[in-house]
Amino acid sequence: MIQFASRMNNLKGSAIRALLALANRPEVLSFAGGMPAPELFPIDKIKAATDAVLDEQGKVALQYSSTDGFKHFREQIAARMEAKNGIKTSADNILITSGSQQGLDYSARVFVDPGDVIIIESPSYLGALNAFKACEPNFIAIPTDDDGMIMEELEKVLATTERVKMIYVIPDFQNPSGRTWPLERRQKFMEIVNKYEIPVIEDNPYGELRYEGENMPALKSMDTKGLVVFLGTFSKILAPGYRLGWVCAEGEILKKYNFMAQAAALQASTEAQLVVSKFIDMYDLDEHVNTIKDCYRKRRDVMVQTMEREFPPEAKFTHPNGGLFAWVELPDYINTNEMAKICMERNVAYVPGDGFFPDEGHNNCIRLNYSCMSEEKIEKGMTILGQVMKEEIAKHKG
Amino acid sequence: MIQFASRMNNLKGSAIRALLALANRPEVLSFAGGMPAPELFPIDKIKAATDAVLDEQGKVALQYSSTDGFKHFREQIAARMEAKNGIKTSADNILITSGSQQGLDYSARVFVDPGDVIIIESPSYLGALNAFKACEPNFIAIPTDDDGMIMEELEKVLATTERVKMIYVIPDFQNPSGRTWPLERRQKFMEIVNKYEIPVIEDNPYGELRYEGENMPALKSMDTKGLVVFLGTFSKILAPGYRLGWVCAEGEILKKYNFMAQAAALQASTEAQLVVSKFIDMYDLDEHVNTIKDCYRKRRDVMVQTMEREFPPEAKFTHPNGGLFAWVELPDYINTNEMAKICMERNVAYVPGDGFFPDEGHNNCIRLNYSCMSEEKIEKGMTILGQVMKEEIAKHKG
């Protein structure tokens, strides 16, 4: 009888990934994934960048390379973080990872022993919860409002809880809620964190995808004590297929991430690093991000407008200013896992909200993605979804 | 004061990687790495395969994909395992990983809780020990002879040890020793393993690189109880820069690896999978492997011949039939860490052997790599190394 490690009791197949398998049929209007629009991938430019890399430095591109990543690539990332997130940093503070999921995995492994506490937002990113669970933590989910994590609740928990080893937040266009923390809340958060000196994982995959308003400074840009670990990724601004992300942190913390990376993976893809780096040298990544933003802004508009028109008044939903997701809360008597099956019969897919909470319950929420369906399909899908909601509510009201 | 997880006490920078940084200077004759010869990378063919992938399925290549990996790619791997390792398997039993280092990491995480026992060969691959250490195991290293792990010693340990959760072995051209287990020892091993029902991690990065004699069947090919997890990689037969490896296992075990992969990384690179898969479709990978073998065979010959001619009689070394490494044992009074510094002054680098043992001591060994230096440089380097050995031995004999 084979015995597995106790951490494996915590890991199950992700509900999203199982659902996505079903939602993959071409006739399904899927709002379930978090995938970028593939029609926007700059394939020809990537091909030119790849050819240039293989022509100019093929032997390097196909060989092993260092754990931390190519220096020039890390310099490009550092420059981008300053321009986009207000973070003054350097290549020396960056570690390249195989997607930011790996950064999430390393984060828990660097900081968390079994039974330690990880503080998260309620709700929080399902993939992060899944990564963290492998370290057998206890989660404490802090309530949120339209401006993100509620600071009074955070402080209450920190004042009364032992063994808090890290705080995980997504302050910009959060997955799943689409919400963004305003400046004052960021400042208050850093004040609290500096007082308690708890490491913070600031996950920022969507920060550059802002459709209106002004960019917020990253928590990392206000970090005076080296407590914030910033996770970035090329998945949403260029292409997820390369699995390229990064960790930005200081001193002893970054050193531990490097040790973890060396043990767990040796390094991220040499070829992928050089191709993306070359792309940034040859082309204007900002211009490409603007193309993405223009497309997603319209899709977001159509989704929000259709939800306003077609959803029943009982459905409350967020109006995201950026990112890929909107979040819907239905009356408690609606079970969105059950409703997902009904929707799937009508070829509409979404992610039920319960997976975004570490505890049971929360069966009345929905995460909707608007980045990879056309405006027409979004309108059609939201109309069907609104119709199903109305029918389910009517059933209850009998 | 930031607290790190207790596993981080186990992880230090790898001695090899630190040494390689020094050995990177062009004037150094380096036998320290485990790198393939970059001049053999089939750059033009890889470029053609990449162009075909981006032309034909660019949107797929740059998008997210499934955790287990592309089915066609897994089918190609399954066919290759049958042809090369005598393993009858299918795509359903394969999980694609980002290099087989990730397979090593997942292995310990799937099976090992802190304080559990991992059985290894003495010596064993340093990178595996480093990956496993993140799970805080106790290692038991089984003595080896020229035919690999000594089965009587293994059985003695299994009969008397609690909490053995996995056995890690490299039966083909082992890293670091270059040794290969003969058939009888493989059969005996499987007999013992079937009796105790302990999961086995069979790491096989070098099996295809045989320079003489006949291929041995993999342990996995003799596995009647689904106990063997086979780790394969494209790093040594094609290119390490893509970070592509795989896990072959059955049933509940493979399921756990998939859960672990989903939590830790989501998936391996979509693009890399499609490019390597396309390369295999377009070209003859066997032919390429033959080119590699022809080159490494000659380099191995020059290394062994020069060692025979130039090393002092006190130095005992292996005569590998394949793979990338030879292993040297010197008298106990020689400290190969100290000697490495002297060699580095003369621009010759190797890896001191102590890192390949989980316990202290073992300071009299050396791992030598012959895959990425020219025959001329190998002859020159081994001559200098022999000279330094003689000087060090003479100092002792005073």
Image: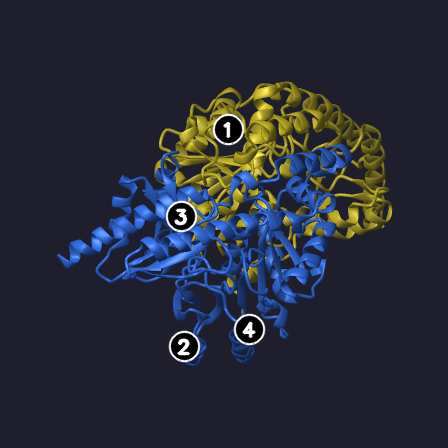
Chain colours: A blue, B yellow
Question: Observer-nearest residue: A355 or A268?
Answer: A355
Chain to which the residue tagged by mark 2 belongs: A
Q: Nearer the viewer, mark 4 or mark 1?
A: 4
- Residue at label 2? A153
Q: Quadrant of residue B291?
A: top right
Amino acid under label 1? Phe
Circles 4 and 1 on the same chain: no
Neighbour class for label 2 at 10 Å: few (<14), some, many (≥20)?
some
Neighbour class for label 3 at 10 Å: few (<14), some, many (≥20)?
few
Q: Nearer the viewer, mark 1 or mark 2?
A: 2
Chain to which the residue tagged by mark 3 belongs: B
- Residue at label 3? B160
Circles 4 and 2 on the same chain: yes
- Dot 4: what SS? helix
- Dot 1: what SS? helix
Q: Quadrant of residue A138?
A: bottom left
Q: Mark 4 or mark 2, which has the lower sequence index? A: 2
Q: Residue furthest left?
A: A398
Report how far apart the C-alphas of labels 1 and 3 lie in the structure. Answer: 43 Å
- Residue at label 1? B73
- Dot 3: what SS? helix
Question: Observer-nearest residue: B224 or A184?
Answer: A184
Is residue B239 positioned above or below B398 on the image? Answer: above
At 29% across and 42% down in the image, what residue appears?
A344
Neighbour class for label 4 at 10 Å: few (<14), some, many (≥20)?
some
Amino acid under label 3? Thr
**Viewer can see residue A190:** yes
- Residue at label 4? A183
Circles 3 and 2 on the same chain: no
**Viewer can see residue B197:** no
Is residue B250 positioned above or below A316 on the image? Answer: above
